Image (cartoon, rainbow, N blue to C red):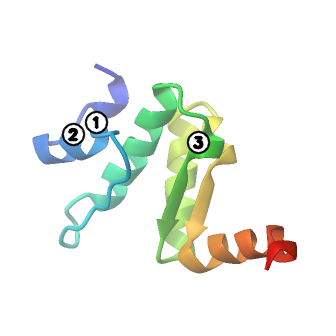
Amino acid sequence: MAHYLDGLNAAQRAGVKNTDGPTMVIAEAGSGKTRVLTMRIAHLLHQGVSPFNVLALTFTNKAAREIKARITAITDGNGRNLWMGTFHSVFARILRAESEKL
């Protein structure tokens, strides 16, 4: 088992290893949601998924920066090319890139 999965409880590990389609993590404060999302993305990258094919949305810029930094550290820099940010920032980026189609 990959070392980045060490320290996860059974529920967290299930959320990380379930890579069949999108996942929404809903849990109480302090339950490890950020850790699960971070490790799930790292797991996808370790499984060979291109970072350009990963979209991760958060509610705050702080969370987005923290998750991206953790993933980049875990994956030896492979996380730099993730589509990662807040709902607003990611969709604003998409709208700017695709504005001629509107």
Disc 2 crowd rating (10 Å Cα; few below 14, some 14-19, many 20+) is some
Q: Which mark is residue 13?
A: 2
Q: Is residue 98 visible?
A: yes
Mark 1 vs mark 2: give the one in front.
1
> Spatial distance from mark 1 to mark 2, Cα to Cα?
6 Å
- What is the residue that sits farthest to the top in this orientation? 1
Q: Which residue is mark 1?
A: 17
- Residue at horizontal 38%, vertical 43%? 40
Quarter of the image where the C terminus is located? bottom right
Q: CA distance from mark 1 to mark 3?
A: 19 Å
| Amino acid type, label 1 | Lys
Q: Which mark is residue 72?
A: 3
Residue at the spot x=51%, y=33% of the render? 45
**Marks 2 and 3: which is nearer the front?**
2
Relative vertical location of residue 38 with respect to residue 65 in this rendering, above or below: above
Q: Earlier in the sequence, mark 2 or mark 3?
A: 2
| Between discs 1 and 3, the one toward the N terminus | 1
Residue at the image position 31 percent from the left and 61 percent from the top: 24
Of the residues shown, which amino acid type is indicated by label 2? Arg
Are the residues tagged 1 and 2 within 8 Å (C-beta)? yes
Callout 2: helix, strand or loop?
Answer: helix
Query: Is 30 left or right of 76, judged from the image as shown?
Result: left
Packing grade of label 3 (10 A; few <14, some 14-19, many >=20) is: some
Q: Compared to 48, does 91 lie above or below?
A: below
- Percent coordinates x, y for residue 85 in the rendering: 59, 66
